[in-house]
Amino acid sequence: MANRKNGKSPEKLYAEMYDKQLREFENMDKDHSPIDDTLHFYSQEEVAAQARQQNIRSRTRQQNAPIDPLDAARGVGQHPDAQNRRRRAADSSASEQYRREARKQAKEHRGGQPVKFGSNNSFNKKKSTGARVAGGILRWLLTVILILVLIMQVMILRYISLVNTTKTGQRLVTNASLSAKEVTNVLLIGSDTRDDEELGRTDSMILLSINRKSDEITMTSLMRDSYVEIPDHGWDKLNAAYRYGGAELLMDTIEHNFDVAVDRYVYVSFFSFINIIDAVGGIELDVTDEEALGMTDPMAEQNKYLGNQKGTDYLTQGGQGLHLNGNQALAYARLRYVGNADFERTDRQRRVISTIVSKAKTLSPLKLDSFLKISCGELNTNMSRAELYVMFYKLLFSMGYDTNELRIPQEGAYFAGSHDGQSTLDLNFDACKQAISETVYKR
């Protein structure tokens, strides 16, 4: 702290003593006498002691000296504390004036802008500009993403609104043990119904299972000739359940005989299937000459109901990657009397569905939009709008899943039977349940 009694701080006294010693050192004889005997550096304690002594001597002189009237007017000779107060006030006023002047000059130097430490140098200006550009790009990207998400939501809701929905009817069996939260089962039903008002037999029954835990999709074909117990209707072929009680009774029959939970279904008729294939632009399949010839009978029946001229879409021979339209693809999926009868027929049906999905993935946005609009309008389901919304995202996120195929009954789990004058497949139900458990549920 500065010594206000004599106007000299300890630092100033120390500097004066150091200069005095330095001058003595410079005036030393040229014989280089020892420095330690001549030059002495004072410690801070010694400087403080000398300052106190000098302060006492100064007060003594001031007290004994006569006071001149003019000096009294100026405050000379007054008590040291009063002088110190006046000096501090004057110093404070000068310091404040100096700070105001410094701020004024700095402001003029900065063009009227307030001075902020480190904010006006060229490096920070470049950094600030880069940050603003990066922030602008990020906001633009977020805006574009938000707009795309909103557009997608609107389109999804539009597709869902096109699906024909109905409430689930009465269920008799809903206690299957093969069930899990991570597995979603949807029964795909293809009927040979020629009239939408009647319940025909089901040519195609495929249980589509999405396992989110194993990242797999399994298509399980259920053979139409499987001899099963239909709740409240006795024993009959599996494809008769739909004719007796619609989709609800068919789901009950599957749960009762195979112990697998199924509560949702999607139904497609003959004509709907044709429209879906045409909407995707047709599909490419490997067709043998025998299959091409065998497709004539089902196409003849289809042409009759479609109002086509006789012979429309007939194939004279097969080929690799043969392009099939909706009418031809349906005949291929219905083909039964070529190869191993209904066993190969289920293989063809799964192949057609897989090919449709693969073809849809390659469509341009405009063609995909047209395909989805047409396809959704051809579907009938018991799922609510909310369930369809969730299902859409499940299917979307499962596009990269591995695909498994299963046929029930599998080889070795049946034998040929005959009941009421009709050929049947008599099943080993325990083996069928085990196959579903291992393939779909990974148990």
Image (tube, rainbow, N blue to C red):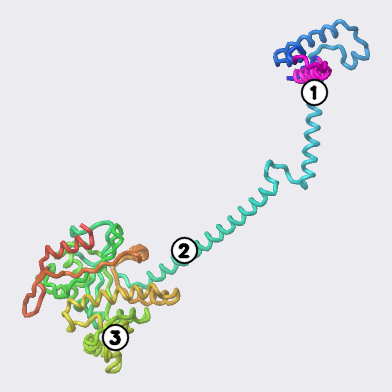
Task: Indicate left or right for 367 with 9 as reference.
Answer: left
Q: Residue at x 19, y 73 (%)?
A: 242
Whether residues under marks 3 and 2 lie with C-beta atoms below 8 angstroms apart, the answer is: no
Q: Residues within 10 Å of mark 3 (few under 14, many from 20)?
A: few
Q: Residue at x 32, y 82 (%)?
A: 321
Q: For marks 3 and 2, give the one nearer the viewer.
A: 3
Q: Which residue is mark 1?
A: 89
Q: Is residue 27 magenta?
A: yes
Q: Residue at x 27, y 56 (%)?
A: 181
- Using the rendered view, name the quadrant where residue 331 is placed: bottom left
Q: Where is residue 25 drawn, in percent x and y?
A: 80, 18
Q: Where is residue 157 drawn, in percent x and y?
A: 41, 67
Q: Secondary structure at mark 3?
A: strand
Looking at the image, can residue 172 be seen? Answer: no
Q: Real-space Cα distance between discs 2 and 1?
A: 70 Å
Quadrant of the drawing holding the C terminus = bottom left
Which of 356 and 57 lies nearest the eye of the viewer?
Answer: 57
Q: Is residue 192 magenta?
A: no
Which of 287 and 220 lies nearest the eye of the viewer?
Answer: 287
Q: Which residue is mark 2?
A: 149
